[in-house]
């Protein structure tokens, strides 16, 4: 299966965000990852539906929207209308996780469930057959540029086994500290979609993306 790179705009220059997104699309990114933070669920504030709508008008790449916010069910329609193609919510932020996942699917987009590093996989047992992607955070969410947490690797492998043993087509995504030094190991562990921010948006974007993707296919 092809491995996908989702370029996180959290590390982009927000003063020229449209140009940044166009540049990484031309450089070979597969998706655009949009981190939405509310200053409550995570200690930072970023963007809302208006920015997602603006980005949808300048790129043909799928917008991979990651809601790191409290009570995300209140805003699903807003982000879908804005152009989200993949919409992710945290299990830790949803009192009624199954209901929220079902609503995302009713709105006609792909549903992602996300877990923080210290959250066990058992939190998503009952919704795993219903989601299109599982996002395992490999840093504690809230800020870009953090170092990858190696202790999450066994959790990634376990999640891959759960997906495969159930015969599901669910994608497995990781976000946090992804760089050319670990994409090979992550691919071997079963990751399908790699979110990268600072490893993309520094220096030569096209070379950065090539450097990130090359180890994904090495055995």
Image (cartoon, rainbow, N blue to C red):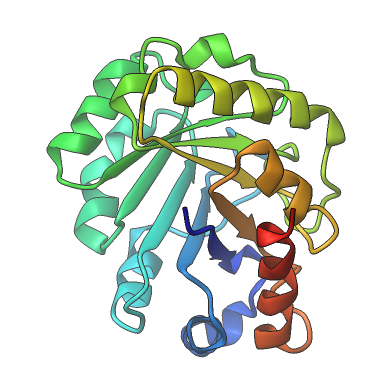
Q: In front here: 191 or 19?
A: 191
Location of residue 211 in the rendering, given as x and y in whole percent from the top left corner: 75, 74
Residue 115 vs residue 27, the one in the foreground = 27
Image: 204 above or below 60: below
Q: Nearer the viewer, residue 22 or 178?
A: 178
Displayed quadrant of residue 140: top right
Q: Is residue 114 left or right of residue 194?
A: left
* Residue that appears at 47% across and 25% down: 164
Give left or right: position of 206 versus 145: left
Q: Is residue 18 above or below residue 34?
A: below
Q: Report which quarter residue 179 is drawn in.
A: bottom right
Residue at 46%, 85% (x, y): give it.
18
The front one of 191 and 140 is: 191
- For residue 73, what is the image quadrant? top left
Q: Is residue 12 above or below residue 40?
A: below
Q: Is residue 201 visible?
A: no
Could you tell me how many numbered marks the image carries?
0
Can the viewer see residue 121 in this picture?
A: yes
- Where is residue 86 drawn, in percent x and y? 34, 50
Q: Residue furthest front?
A: 219
Q: Is residue 108 above or below residue 12?
A: above
Give x and y (percent) for residue 71: 40, 28
Residue 218, x across and y down, in percent: 73, 59
Residue occupying the point 57% across, 67% down: 7
């Amino acid at each position: 299966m092809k491995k996908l790179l989702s370029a996180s705009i959290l590390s982009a220059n927000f003063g020229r965000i449209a140009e940044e997104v166009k540049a990484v699309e031309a450089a070979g990114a597969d998706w655009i990852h949009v981190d939405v933070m509310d200053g409550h669920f995570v200690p930072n504030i970023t963007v809302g539906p208006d920015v997602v709508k603006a980005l949808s008008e300048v790129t043909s790449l799928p917008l991979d929207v990651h809601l790191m916010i409290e009570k995300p069910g209140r805003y699903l329609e807003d982000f879908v209308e804005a152009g989200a193609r993949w919409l992710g919510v945290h299990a830790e932020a949803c009192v009624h996780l199954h209901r929220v996942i079902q609503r995302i699917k009713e709105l006609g987009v792909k549903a992602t469930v996300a877990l923080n590093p210290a959250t066990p996989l058992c939190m998503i047992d009952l919704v795993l057959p219903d989601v299109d992607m599982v996002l395992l955070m490999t840093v504690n969410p809230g800020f870009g540029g953090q170092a990858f947490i190696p202790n999450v690797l066994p959790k990634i492998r376990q999640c891959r086994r759960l997906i495969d043993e159930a015969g599901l087509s669910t994608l497995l995504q990781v976000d946090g500290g992804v760089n050319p030094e670990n994409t090979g190991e992550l691919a071997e562990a079963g990751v399908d979609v790699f979110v990268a921010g600072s490893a993309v948006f520094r220096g030569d974007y096209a070379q950065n993306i090539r450097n990130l993707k090359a180890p994904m296919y090495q055995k």
